[in-house]
Amino acid sequence: MLKPVDPGPLPPERPVGELVHQLIEEAKAYARAEIDLLKVIGTAKVRAFLLPAILFGAAFICALAAITALALGVVMALARFIGPLAAGFIGLLIFAGLAGGLGWYGAERLKREL
């Protein structure tokens, strides 16, 4: 039968205070590494979404100009029949109602998703 090998003398036990200090230092290093990792991930995501965000902003500005032109056309068309003041008011009601409906629909979809 084989005899177990003698592992030799055991290393001296370290004081509890020293072990706690080492544990705290290792925890701090781990926390710093995790924070650095999250910073790198966040920076990568921001860089990935930067150009699409700029393009969506430009598209929004173009869409806003198109809606303004449409609203102006509606008001000018109505002005022939009911006068400029009433046409402006009706145009306001039409586009305010449209904006309110779209905003309500967006809020409902957001509630559903969350």
Image (tube, grey):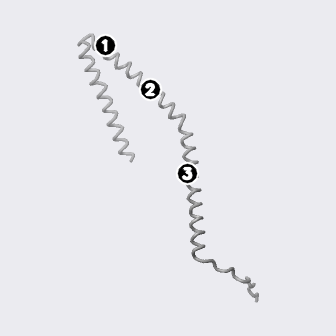
Residue at 25 percent across and 11 percent down: it is 81
Q: Position of residue 41 (x, y in %)?
A: 56, 48
Q: Nearer the viewer, residue 54 or 114?
A: 54
Q: Is residue 73 above or below residue 114?
A: above
Q: Nearer the viewer, mark 1 or mark 2?
A: 2
Q: Position of residue 55 (x, y in %)?
A: 51, 30
From the image, which quarter does the N terminus lie in? bottom right
What residue does disc 2 label? 61
The local secondary structure at tag 2 comes to helix
Q: Is residue 16 above or below residue 105?
A: below
Q: Nearer the viewer, residue 71 or 112?
A: 71
Which circle's residue, 3 or 2, is located before the other in the chain? 3
Q: CA distance from mark 3 to mark 2?
A: 33 Å
Q: CA distance from mark 1 to mark 3?
A: 56 Å
What residue does disc 1 label? 77
Q: Are marks 1 and 3 in contact (CB under 8 Å)?
A: no
